[in-house]
Image (spheres, rainbow, N blue to C red):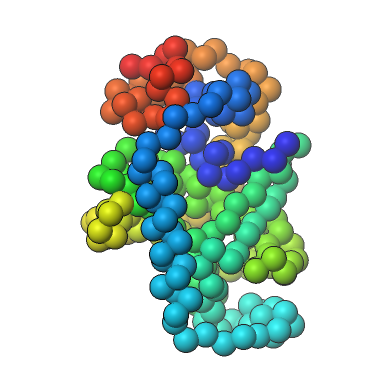
Amino acid sequence: MRIPISGFADLGFCELKVVHRFLEERKPVFHQNVYLGGAQHATSAEIDALKPHTTVTLDELLEALRDEESVIEFPSESVRVEFQSNGFTFSGRLDKLVKQGREAFVIDEKFTGGNGGQFHQKYAKQLSGYCYGLADGKTSVGGVALGEKVFAGLSLSGKIVERDIESRAQLGEPLLVMFDAQSFRPSLERFSEIMRGSFEARELACGNPARCAICEYRSECGHRC
């Protein structure tokens, strides 16, 4: 079964969302902000496309990745990762990826409409999933496969930049996410437990009224606050 990393990350918002989405296949009711956010991501990609860039071959890119001093900024939304865990295939596309020497940073823009604080744990889990894919899975750029574990030797971290859904103004300081594979694996195990049905629904509910109020499953959830 293929799982979007963004969907897996719902563990950090409300574990019951995993049940609604993947086990019960309930239809979510999205807010208009979701569509506005999609348009803003497209705008970010268009802005980045105007920056000066250099075209390289696959061999040149792989050599640059091995160079301990190279600096590489990948085109927006060009990097995809995929990894396997407990019979599931997790995949996702990164907003931005920058390599600087022995470090690599996943940068994610979130257009929140002012509700960003409710999603910080979800965002952090999403970025950790991307980092795990870079280190332990397959990576492709622009549809071209780079190989497996090509970022395994680098120090990986994430940065979440929250912006206003309409003005694109940055909201506060970026949220830094330090990645550690050993600390992340229990989240994969927890996801597998839920998908196997090892739970009581009421135990998974977040119990947070503020989160319930903005959840896309609030009209369907029998355990809402």
Relative horizontal placement of residue 190, taking residue 16 as reference (left or right): right
Residue at image coords 64%, 83% = 64
Q: Is residue 222 placed above or below 216 in the rendered structure?
A: above
Asked whether the viewer can see residue 33, the reply is yes
141, 176: nearer the viewer: 141
Measured from the top left, where is residue 186 in percent x and y? 58, 37
Asked whether the viewer can see residue 99, the reply is no
- In which quadrant is the C terminus drawn? top left
121, 34: nearer the viewer: 34
Q: Is residue 60 placed above or below 123 in the rendered structure?
A: below
Give the total of numbered labels: 0
151, 32: nearer the viewer: 32
Q: Is residue 195 placed above or below 79 in the rendered structure?
A: above
Residue at image coords 48%, 76% = 49
Residue at image coords 63%, 18% = 198
Relative horizontal placement of residue 17, taking residue 165 as reference (left or right): right
Measured from the top left, where is residue 185 in percent x and y? 60, 42
Residue at image coords 56%, 38% = 8
Measured from the top left, where is residue 168 in percent x and y? 29, 60
Q: Is residue 169 placed above or below 184 in the rendered structure?
A: below
224, 41: nearer the viewer: 41
Measured from the top left, where is residue 28 in percent x and y? 49, 29
- In which quadrant is the N terminus drawn? top right
